[in-house]
């Protein structure tokens, strides 16, 4: 299915570029930047600062659109093809981006692949004890290594990704290089402060284990601070119904570890979490939410305040 989708995307790219190549606005003085997901979009705004008004900045995935199910339109492909800077995750969910880049009309386009930025620090997907694995993954076995693409959920990773964005903006707009450097320095300090707050929270916590009645996209954050976790599904799972075995295992873990909270993701219907709680001895655990920034965000949100909210949730869960 993935190969078929890539072929379809390639066809869209070719047709779109053939039809639209004569309409490109070469007189547009604004830098054109396309970001696939919200964290990338917000990082560009933060590093550009006051200069953001001089950038034609596009966020492809609007609120409510999940990275794992997103399929680019012909309009999206054309926008990417002509932009000066294209930022994407580089995981399994946006493999289509490689075809869009290959067929781009702007051959001088800067490209940032977040997973390439992290190089050897990217982590393979893992299935921990009790986790329900998709049938497709069971069939694939060890034939193909898949990496966890949720790299933005680590503020340590965010610093490196933002540095790459700063470098690209500076290369494209040398006149404002000092502005981008100054804004990056300020933002990097804010990320470092948040990183320290996460570290201190975990260091002083009574517990060190999280339990998700949902998908689990927080592996990078967990490993940053040496936390443990259990979850119903891996981060990129397409499953929505947990098996009896999975529910039973997680409910027993809640009892065994005396956990008082079950975590869900933004946008969850909380059905699995509620079922886990119903199968515990006390049946009194609370449900809390952590925001993965994969699909849901609101006007006024930014990367720092969402991650701060996730930290506040950890303070509840771990204490």
Image: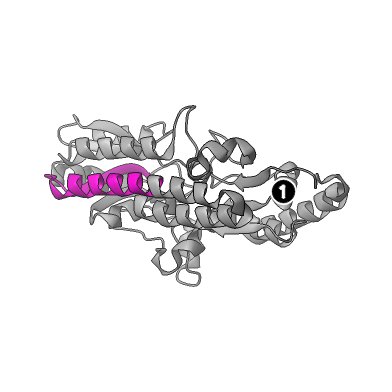
Mark 1, other Cα within 10 Å: few <14 / some 14–19 / many ≥20: many
> Is 116 displayed left or right of 268 in the figure?
right
Relative to residue 89, is residue 211 depicted above or below? above
Q: Nearer the viewer, residue 38 or 285?
A: 38
Q: Quadrant of the C terminus?
A: top left
> Is 190 displayed left or right of 52 in the figure?
left
Q: Where is residue 242 in the image (x, y as percent from the top left)?
A: 38, 44
> Is 64 displayed left or right of 211 in the figure?
right
The residue at the point 32 percent across, 51 percent down is 221
The reply to whether residue 255 is in sight is yes
Q: Does the magenta stretch include residue 290?
A: no
Q: Position of residue 203 (x, y in %)?
A: 15, 50
Q: Identify the residue at the far bottom of this view.
A: 143
Q: Nearer the viewer, residue 125 or 45?
A: 45
The residue at the point 23 percent across, 42 percent down is 251
Q: Does the magenta stretch include residue 193?
A: yes
Q: What stretch is highlighted in magenta?
A: 187-216
Q: Mark 1 points at which residue?
A: 77
The residue at the point 50 percent across, 51 percent down is 178
- Splitting the image into 4 quarters, where does residue 23 fall? top right
- Splitting the image into 4 quarters, where does residue 248 fall? top left
How many numbered marks, from 0 up?
Answer: 1
The residue at the point 18 percent across, 29 percent down is 284
Q: Which of 91 and 275 is in front in this view?
A: 91
The reply to whether residue 218 is in sight is no
Q: Quadrant of the N terminus?
A: bottom right
Q: Nearer the viewer, residue 148 or 284?
A: 148
């Amino acid at each position: 299915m993935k190969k078929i989708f890539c072929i379809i995307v390639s066809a869209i790219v070719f047709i779109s570029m053939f039809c639209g190549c004569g309409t490109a606005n070469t007189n547009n003085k604004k830098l054109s930047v396309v970001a696939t997901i919200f964290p990338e979009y917000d990082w560009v705004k933060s590093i550009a600062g006051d200069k953001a008004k001089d950038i034609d900045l596009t966020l492809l995935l609007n609120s409510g659109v999940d990275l794992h199910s997103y399929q680019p339109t012909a309009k999206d492909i054309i926008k990417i093809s002509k932009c000066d800077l294209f930022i994407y995750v580089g995981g399994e969910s946006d493999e289509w981006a490689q075809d869009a880049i290959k067929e781009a009309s702007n051959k001088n386009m800067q490209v940032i692949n977040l997973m390439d930025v992290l190089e050897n620090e990217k982590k393979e997907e893992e299935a921990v004890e009790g986790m329900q694995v998709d049938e497709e993954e069971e069939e694939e076995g060890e034939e193909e290594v898949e990496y966890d693409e949720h790299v933005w959920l680590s503020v340590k990773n965010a610093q490196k990704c933002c540095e790459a964005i700063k470098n690209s903006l500076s290369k494209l707009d040398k006149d404002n290089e000092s502005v981008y450097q100054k804004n990056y320095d300020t933002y990097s300090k804010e990320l470092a402060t948040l990183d320290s707050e996460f570290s201190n929270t975990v260091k002083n916590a009574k517990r060190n284990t999280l339990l998700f009645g949902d998908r689990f996209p927080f592996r990078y954050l967990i490993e940053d601070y040496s936390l443990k976790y259990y979850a119903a599904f891996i981060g990129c799972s397409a499953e929505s119904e947990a098996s009896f075995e999975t529910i039973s295992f997680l409910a027993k873990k809640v009892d065994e570890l005396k956990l008082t909270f079950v975590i869900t993701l933004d946008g969850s219907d909380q059905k699995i979490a509620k079922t886990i709680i119903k199968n515990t001895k006390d049946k009194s655990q609370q449900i809390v939410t952590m925001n993965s920034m994969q699909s849901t965000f609101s006007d006024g949100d930014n990367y720092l305040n969402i991650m701060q909210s996730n930290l506040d949730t950890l303070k509840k869960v771990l204490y």
